[in-house]
Image (cartoon, rainbow, N blue to C red):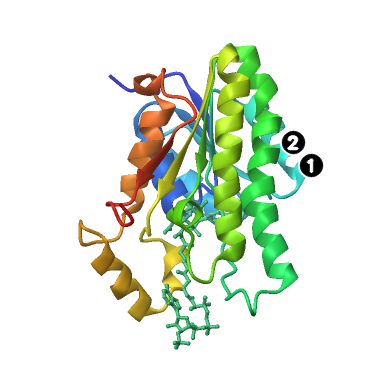
């Protein structure tokens, strides 16, 4: 049986990488999916490709750092599908630099997209989840948020902040039958990791007992678990999907 039949999911950052894999997987499981991305040209291409395969997906431009843009994303979803059941807060950016060199602009940009963006999207979707009488919010933390990472003061702060928000919202929203959980992926093969120098990647692989980086599908499958009925009593959790890199 399709695990997300009849459900409507918004996946931010759904045009590329982990988000795109989640769009495909959720579509295959019967969900109607909004591909909400800043990179609208790619999102629209994905919409066409996936509609041709019989999936019910729709692209919309959003900048999660901008409240008005997020409200438009939610209005679009309601107009298109009349309900929202699942929000995957997946959009994210890096602006890596050592603490001694990080600019205030680099710090602010990452906090605004990776942390404030999650606040905006969840708050905007909330009335619709309450209206449904249940819902699932899945946030995307990172191994950098749980353990820290060289060159990522801004990113680690945002990803650690996401864990605090996840646990707070689980406590606030549990009584509304809304589950809020997070995935903390390890280093995963997407364009985000392409900027990391090769020698650092090789070093990282050696630290993973499973001997490889994550694949987008590894993370998307964890999103699916948290979005599906299989996790109805799982709330406020951060699931590490990282091949045990830092265990
Ligand atoms: N662990 C230990 N030491 C490290 C290191 C690491 N991961 N990364 C860099 N260093 C060391 C370097 O070897 C170097 O040492 P020496 O001075 O002894 O030579 C020193 O730190 C300075 O490094 P750089 O010469 O590279 O400094 P830079 O200013 O040119 O660049 C940087 C700094 C941009 C942070 C660069 O080192 C870099 O890109 N590092 C990787 C950052 C990273 O891991 N980003 C993750 C992106 S993927 C992602 O974010 C997804 C996720 O959730 C995990
Ligand atoms: P990616 O760079 O392949 O995809 C990110 C997507 O987010 C892109 O489509 C981009 O256009 C979109 N985006 C960026 N800023 C946006 C904004 N302001 N509004 C809307 N969309 C925006 O990256 P990847 O790897 O797929 O990352 C997905 C999530 O997983 C991110 O939150 C990232 O921090 C997290 N993550 C990634 C890891 C990795 O190693 N790739 C490890 C741990 C966490």
Mark 1 and mark 2: Cα distance apart in space: 5 Å
Q: Which mark is residue 127?
A: none
- Quadrant of the rendered structure where residue 71 is? top right
- Image point (36%, 38%), residue name: 222
**Residue appearing at x 41%, y 37% in the figure:** 223
Q: Is residue 21 above or below residue 226?
A: below
Q: Is 95 left, or right, of 5 in this rendering?
A: right
Q: Residues within 10 Å of mark 2 (few under 14, many from 20)?
A: some
Residue 100 relative to residue 197: left or right: right
Write the residue at 68% across / 65% down.
Answer: 107
Q: Is residue 33 above or below residue 156?
A: above
Who is closer to the viewer here, 194 or 109?
109
Q: In what element is the residue under mark 2?
A: helix
Image coordinates for residue 146, horizontal then vertical, percent: 47, 51
How packed mark 1 is, by other alpha carbons closer than 10 Å (few <14, some 14-19, many 20 or more), is: few
Q: Which residue is mark 1?
A: 68
Q: Left of 29 or right of it: where is 112?
A: right
Answer whether residue 84 is visible to the viewer in this image.
no
Q: Secondary structure at mark 1?
A: helix
**Contact (CB < 8 A) between labels 1 and 2?**
yes
Give coordinates of residue 178: x percent, y percent.
55, 20
Task: Tell me the quarter of the picture where residue 191 sits.
Answer: bottom left
The residue to which callout 2 is attached is 71
Residue 111 in percent (x, y) is at: 67, 55
What is the quadrant of the N terminus in the image? top left
């Amino acid at each position: 049986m399709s695990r997300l039949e009849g459900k409507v999911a918004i996946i931010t950052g759904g045009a590329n990488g982990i988000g795109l894999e989640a769009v495909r997987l959720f579509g295959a499981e019967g969900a109607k999916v909004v591909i909400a991305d800043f990179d609208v040209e790619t999102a629209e291409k994905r919409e066409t490709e996936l509609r041709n395969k019989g999936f019910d997906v729709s692209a919309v431009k959003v900048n999660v750092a901008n409240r008005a843009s997020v409200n438009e994303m939610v209005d679009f979803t309601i107009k298109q599908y009349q309900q929202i059941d699942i929000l995957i807060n997946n959009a994210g950016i890096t602006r890596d630099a050592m603490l001694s060199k990080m600019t205030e602009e680099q710090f602010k940009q990452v906090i605004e997209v990776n942390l404030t963006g999650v606040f905006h999207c969840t708050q905007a979707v909330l009335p619709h989840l309450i209206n449904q009488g249940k819902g699932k919010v899945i946030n995307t933390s990172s191994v950098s948020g749980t353990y820290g990472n060289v060159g990522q003061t801004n990113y680690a702060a945002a990803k650690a902040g996401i864990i605090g928000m996840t646990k707070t919202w689980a406590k606030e929203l549990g009584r509304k039958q809304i589950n809020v959980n997070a995935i903390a992926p390890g280093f995963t093969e997407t364009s985000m990791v392409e900027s990391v120098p090769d020698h650092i990647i090789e070093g990282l692989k050696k630290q993973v007992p499973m001997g490889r980086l994550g694949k987008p599908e590894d993370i998307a499958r964890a999103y699916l678990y948290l979005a599906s009925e299989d996790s109805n009593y799982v709330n406020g959790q951060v699931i590490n999907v990282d091949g045990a890199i830092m265990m």
